[in-house]
Image (spheres, rainbow, N blue to C red):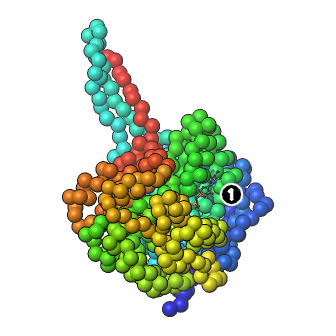
Amino acid sequence: MTDITLLPQVTAFLGREHGHYISGRLLAGAGTEKFAVVNPATGQAIAQVVEGGQEEVDAAMQAAFAAFHGAWARVSPMERGNCLMRLADLLQAHREELAQLESLCSGKTIQLARGLEIDMAAQFLRYFAGWSSKISGETLNVSLPSFRGEQYTAFTRREPLGVVVGIIPWNFSIMIAIWKLAAALTCGCTVVLKPSEYTPLTMLRVAELAQEAGIPDGTLNVVNGSGARLGPALIAHPHCAKVSFTGSVPTGIAVGKAAMEQGIVRTTLELGGKNGAAFLADVSVDKMVDGIIEAGYLNQGQICAAAERFYLPDSHIDAVLEKLTQRLGAMKVGSSLDETTEVGPLANEAHYRKVLGLFDKARAEGSQIVCGGHALAGPGFFVAPTAIRATGPDDLLMREETFGPVGTFLAYDDEEQMIAMMNDSPYGLAASLWTNDLSKAMRMIPRIEAGTVWINMHTFLDPALPFGGMKSSGIGREFGSAFIEHYTELKSVMVRY
Ligand code: NAD
């Protein structure tokens, strides 16, 4: 098969001058420096973006603040939801255009970009839209007795926080940005998004669609450029009421510290992990292999919830690794724009070099590379799907996130020991347990230290279910109704009469 043909509107978009989206306008900004957007499947630059600075930060934060008190505040809750619904329709109407852009910038295969990135983003938008008219406080009974016969009544109000700064990683440049903007907007907040410098283009196009959907100017803004410079500047801005960050643990810690120092700015931190998947001995070898591929190798492993640590019964591990080697070796590696590709490139050169460096360290440590463990012929940042057999629970690749197509495998012969090893990690984003014994699974669920536990499945995010990390994998929850707490302030009102 060959690459699909790029739509003329994609080629035209790439040829534009790119910068930021502020107050309902695409603009290059005042900067003189530019950075390149590189297609990781070819290593070639496909666009240039003007680096943002303090001037764009100020303009975006001011626009969002004005809209929070003005145009967006005047939009009724029901109409806020309608705006998000129309944006969802526009994402679907521009599905192919957005999927091609996403695939070109991130190396995501075109099939995944269409189905997972665009279609799922539209579904999440619709879910959040439904909440706009249902966010409310409650009426409460005052508990203490009155002294002189006076009466009391009390109620709570859910009030939007203000301007939300959304900082986005490169692995889902549309979907994760949509999670943040939809949560903010449905609650009545306004938003300034800072996409990753590797994937700065897609939100510029989505912002234009948001305007078409009727979202007033200033309500959604996008500022592009270096995270190390723009991130702290956005958080330090006096109009920043909340920062919603998704990314790595070290950056998340820096963001959390900056937010606290800035006067207890509210934070949601969705961070990395080293997610575990454990298979019990009642599962067949074939089912284990299917489960491992589902859990660890989608989008080249570049999914925060993907499993990287696999625990297999001693009785099964040899057979599973043999079959897994065959399956991974048969996966079609290729161009992200080829509809038959199963494994695309890693999303950028820095990440590719990091993953290759981890292979070297694993070898030096004595871990057994069962398959893969090397780069594939370029151009582009391709890495072979890899399986590593650890020597023990303290091997580097049982502890450090690769965020690549890399599973590390450890045998166990005692289920108690397996649970202890699963929990022996500073992270706790997600985990999965695979067994036909549902009763045993139900007993193990409360003992697994992870924000999400899947049984006989992995990497399935549903907007109705809260998502977020335990331990060093983050603070706060997205989705469900849990997000409301993180995008509104709860005000108590008491009345004497
Ligand atoms: P990253 O931490 O390098 O960057 C994330 C964002 O932070 C980017 O927009 C970057 O420009 C910005 N940034 C960089 N320095 C900053 C600073 N000092 N202050 C503020 N912002 C700054 O992460 P990444 O490499 O883009 O993404 C991969 C990581 O994200 C992985 O660790 C993965 O597990 C994690 N992730 C977590 C989730 C989740 O929901 N828990 C989802 C996706 C990815």
| Residue 205 visible in the shown view | no
Dot 1 falls on a residue whose secondary structure is loop
- Front-lying residue, 420 or 59: 420
Q: Residue 136 lies in what quarter of the image?
A: top left
- Find disc 1 in the rendering and name its residue: 226
Q: Residue at x 61, y 47 (%)?
A: 254
Count of numbered labels shown in the rendering: 1
Judged from this view, the residue extending furthest toward the right is 32
Residue 455 image offset from top left, x and y in percent: 30, 62
- The quarter of the picture where the C terminus appears is top left
Q: Residue at x 32, y 60 (%)?
A: 414
Residue 375 image offset from top left, x and y in percent: 60, 78
Q: Residues within 10 Å of mark 1 (few under 14, many from 20)?
A: some
Judged from this view, the residue extending furthest toward the bottom is 1
Amino acid on which disc 1 is placed: Ser
Distance from mark 1 CB to nearest ligand 1 atom below 8 Å: yes
Residue 460 image offset from top left, x and y in percent: 37, 64
- Front-lying residue, 176 or 301: 301
Q: Is 177 situated above or below 301? A: above
Ligand 1 quarter of the rendering: bottom right
Q: Residue at x 38, y 47 (%)?
A: 482
| Residue 391 visible in the shown view | yes
Q: Is 276 situated above or below 1? A: above
Residue 93 image offset from top left, x and y in percent: 45, 72
Q: Residue at x 45, y 72 (%)?
A: 298
Tell me if 70 is positioned left or right of 143 in this view: right
- Front-lying residue, 338 or 58: 338
Tell me if 446 is positioned left or right of 215 in this view: left
